[in-house]
Amino acid sequence: MGGSMGNHENILEAKDVTKRFGDVVANDQVNLSVRRGEIHGILGENGAGKSTLMNILYGLYTPTDGTVVFEGEARQFASPKDAVDAGIGMVHQHFMLVPSMSVLENIVLGERELPPGYEPTGIGVLDRLVGMLTRHRSAPRERVVELTDEYGLDIDPDRKVWELDIGEQQRVEILKALYRDVDLLILDEPTAVLTPNEAEQMFETIQSLVEEGLTVIFITHKLWEVEELADRVTVLRDGASVETVATDGVTQSELAELMVGKEVLLDLEKAPVDVGDPVLQAETLRVEDDRGIEALSGVDLTVNRGEIVGVAGVSGNGQRELSQSLFGFRPLLDGRIRIDGEDLTGEPPSGFMDAGVSYIPQDRHEYGAAPGLSVMDNACAKEFESDRFRRYGFLLDYPNMAEYTRDVVDRFDIRGVGDVEETPAGDLSGGNLQKLILGRELDRQPDLLVANQPTRGVDVGAIESIRNLVLERRASGTGVVLVSEDLDELFDLSDRIRVIYEGEFVFETTPAATTKTEVGMAMTTGAPGEQSQATAGAGVRAEDR
Amino acid sequence: MSFVAGIADSTVSLATPLLLAALGEVIAERSGVINLGVEGMMLAGALAGFAAAVVTNSMWLGVLVGLLAGVSLALVHAVLAVSLNADQVVSGIMITILGIGLTTLLGRSWVGQSVSGFEEIAVPGLSRLPIVGQAMFNVTALDYLALALTPIVWYFLTRTNIGAEITAVGEDPEAADTAGVPVFRIRYGCILIGGALAGIAGAQLSVAFTNFWTSEMIAGRGWIAVALVIFGQWRVGSVFLGAYLFAAVDALSFRSGDVGLGSEVFGSRLIADVVDVALDPQVMQVYPYLATVVALWYIMRRGTLEELGAPNSLVETYSRERD
């Protein structure tokens, strides 16, 4: 537990902050106080109002009601620039970087550094014009290099942002804030997009920020991260602040209860299921990624009925392409795919659908759902051509579709749906939208389910029900390919685990026969190897729970 | 004046309005806002500038008033497209239609009048060069202005802090906003600069080039300017070249009366007929538009707008509290 805690003065306070978007109350009289020099966790489910609150603190949103006090002064930030000038920086969950520009340009953007040696004349207009119409980068570059050294944020300032991986982009975001001399840094779910090793590095960075005197607000919905990193944590639920507690005196299950409002079962009922005939037989699959680089170099994968095969891997090792090709969504350069013995090689997604394959894509907004269409349209999207929703042979049977959708909403406990025909699917929170997609895919009673990161970015309550739904399907004989970066999920659900590394399966095991450390090693190095503490941070941490 | 020198001379004068309007459009589009009101802004600039020049007998006041007319219409576009998040395409086309309607109505009483126009200013020495001497170095102040603005706009967009901010706003306004870039002010500024240049472009046509006003005088040049930006892939240098290329085609049709080719040159009856039709002054007036279509066809075959270099957020509106 880090942090210089010498001064107990609050650097930031939010008092009764309320934010409404139309009729929706995103923040309801939220109170928050952050002490100087602490790491303050903000914990809450998706849709609990965490990001809204942070966007208010950062000047992006104007609060409907309430006050924000920063450094002892009531402030109303009109723009992020105001907040940054006051000393608040923020790293958003979706990075705010311009991909076509260099690291240095992104860091300096908006600062309008004056040319070296230019003495401000005191004539505001003139100085402003000089700032706008010149561009000097030598001094800023030195400053950036200094900062990278000081905080160990290794990055080449001249690379374009689009060339960087996610972890590097995050470092650029932090540098952007440090360059602006902020005192308080807000990190919105910083580990959500990182691999376990990158997350470990991120934690070290946060510690060193606090050692240098910064205060950090850290948003997450992962309980162990709060326990590990934060000094105190404020829990938000349904837009309101529930409680602020010191992490020393609280357990994870107590936090979980505060977060979801009821005691959650973190364990799943996983009964043994008799494994049946092979439902998926994929042989020597070779595919390219979007850039035309080989993503799978001849992999085999067999899944039997009633079996969950977990595919573990660090993002970008071919698992996305694998899941796409198992649904006919990505053309094969080589190889064969059989579903229930039937050869579907070269078939379009509709062929796979008809053969009884269901697919849950990684990106639920882009591929999984049409956010602008209603919940009903989305729920029926794969069935609207079937006879059950036909009327007179060529019209859609709206009453029937609506009734069916209400039934799905009910059975899969999808919340936030007003009128199934009116509410756009995009209005649902991440977890509920995922349950809608899952409901649609599972209700088809698939023979094979291909799920890519089904619980990523989903809150605890929804995670539990999604995992149980997958287990139910397994019990009724569906074969499942579960692609995930979450080792807990893989260990909880899988019957077999296969590790993918640089387009090949490098390790096969079962949850009982291995440890998370071993799988973590295989994910990051390509071999389960010796269990070294240095490189197996992910596995170790997961086991610590 | 020889035929070729005549073409070259007209090319420079005709390139000026295209270049001014297209430079303005590059600035606006680099900030992520497409302005399809250029045609209307040029019309407004042409009429207002001409009227002011007639009344005051000052050509420069005419240009200034033309500029202000362009800015006024651009302000409408900025309020609609930036502040109120209206569809940029709809707003722009509306402004063009508004410009056509207003200038046709208000311009009636100005038809038939004329102004003295601008003196040509010769650059000592350079103006004696063959062909390009008269064309490039003995032209009006507005032609020099357009030539001078090309490197200035290039420098402004690619070598200054504000240029980097404009690029960032055009690529990702949300990222720019969170970095402290004043997104709304920048978009307003870029649209207004675009309107000012379109206004000057219009005034150049009426005050400096034809010296009279007719309601058809812009004749789609505003649209060609928009196409030029795509053809030039949002780069100032390429837009400059494109403007000259199109102006040359335009000059060809403008000078078509000078052409004496036809049946006496070509022996074959059929070829002679085709050539006669192709060189008919009425037909030749179609060439600039035909060239626009061909140029867009050529460039769009090479990739999507993004691949060609269009700003990522072009045509997209931005507001903060949108989830």
Image (tube, coloured by chain):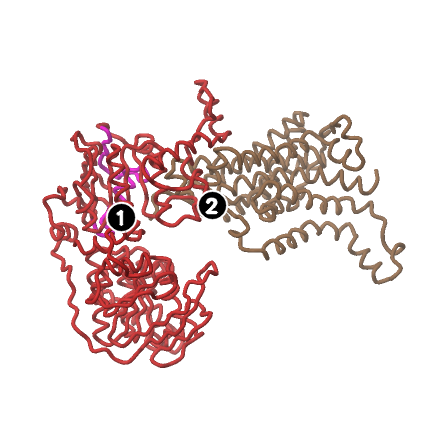
Chain colours: A red, B brown
From the top left corner, tell me how far across and down residue A156 is, in percent.
42, 41
From the top left corner, tell me how far across and down residue A73 is, in percent.
23, 27
Residue at label 1?
A200
Residue at label 2?
A100
Whether A50 is among the magenta residues is yes
On the question of residue A376 being in view, the answer is: no
Residue A346 against residue B96 in the figure, above or below: below
Sequence-wise first label, 2 or 1: 2
Q: Nearer the viewer, residue A387 or A439?
A: A439
Say if labels 2 and 1 share a chain. yes
Q: Secondary structure at mark 1?
A: helix
Which residue is the extreme one toward the left? A249
From the top left corner, tell me how far across and down residue B202 is, in percent.
63, 37
Q: Amino acid at mark 1?
A: Glu
Label 2 resides on the chain identified as A
Mark in the foreground, 2 or 1: 1
Q: Amino acid at mark 2?
A: Ser
